[in-house]
Amino acid sequence: MKRIAQKPYLIFWLLIPIVILIGFLNKEKTFHLNIHDSYYIISQLWISVLISLLFGLIGIGYYLIITTNRKLYTWMTIIHVATTLLGFVIILLLPYINFGVDATTPLHLFDEEVMQTRVKICMFLSLILGQVIYILNISIASFRKKRLAL
């Protein structure tokens, strides 16, 4: 855990090619999100490109703070890395998850779609919370005193 807090940018930068590869392998798959009367459909390839871009920006932010000898809060860094990685892994693997909805009912496809939408919304909320923690951590570290060089 301490290693994650010391160089979190490496995790995000190493995951960029993996996420793009997943996107290219699953470019026919789509991500559906139904919110009230709006229905959003996004290709898995575009989701992976957007995730990689976000990972790159997050990595640059961590790299700049660490190279300027600013001190990050370890617990905030670990919470951010864990929620971000877990959330994006679930979003990328969601088309493959079977929710075990009873297929004998006439509306079983609707039930599965409702369940997937609930999981997606929970993931998006946890991802947003993780990014708020990231912004707070970077902002606080920017205004804190520099670490003493040993």
Image (cartoon, rainbow, N blue to C red):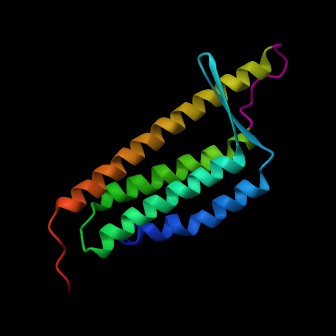
The residue most toward the bottom is 150
**Quadrant containing the N terminus in the rendered view:** bottom left
Q: How many marks?
A: 0
Q: Nearer the viewer, residue 32 or 85?
A: 32
| Residue 99 appears left or right of 52 | right
- At horizontal 40% and vertical 41% (from top left) the residue drawn is 129
Q: Quadrant for residue 3, please give it.
A: bottom left
Location of residue 133 in the rendering, given as x and y in whole percent from the top left corner: 34, 48
Q: Does 64 sit above or below residue 149? A: above
**Quadrant containing the C terminus in the rendered view:** bottom left
Q: Does 126 sit above or below residue 21? A: above
- At horizontal 16% and vertical 62% (from top left) the residue drawn is 144
Q: Which residues are the magenta region?
A: 98-106
Q: Quadrant for residue 4, please give it.
A: bottom left
Location of residue 132 in the rendering, given as x and y in whole percent from the top left corner: 36, 45
Q: Nearer the viewer, residue 104 or 69?
A: 69
Any magenta on residue 105?
yes
The residue most toward the left is 145
Location of residue 95 in the rendering, given as x and y in whole percent from the top left corner: 73, 40
Q: Nearer the viewer, residue 63 or 6?
A: 63
Secondary structure mostly seen in the magenta stretch: loop
Any magenta on residue 141?
no
Q: Quadrant for residue 21, please give it.
A: bottom right
| Residue 26 appears left or right of 134 | right
Q: Does 118 sit above or below residue 30? A: above
Location of residue 36 in the rendering, given as x and y in whole percent from the top left corner: 59, 17
Q: Does 102 sit above or below residue 73? A: above
- At horizontal 67% and vertical 48% (from top left) the residue drawn is 46
- At horizontal 77% and vertical 50% (from top left) the residue drawn is 27
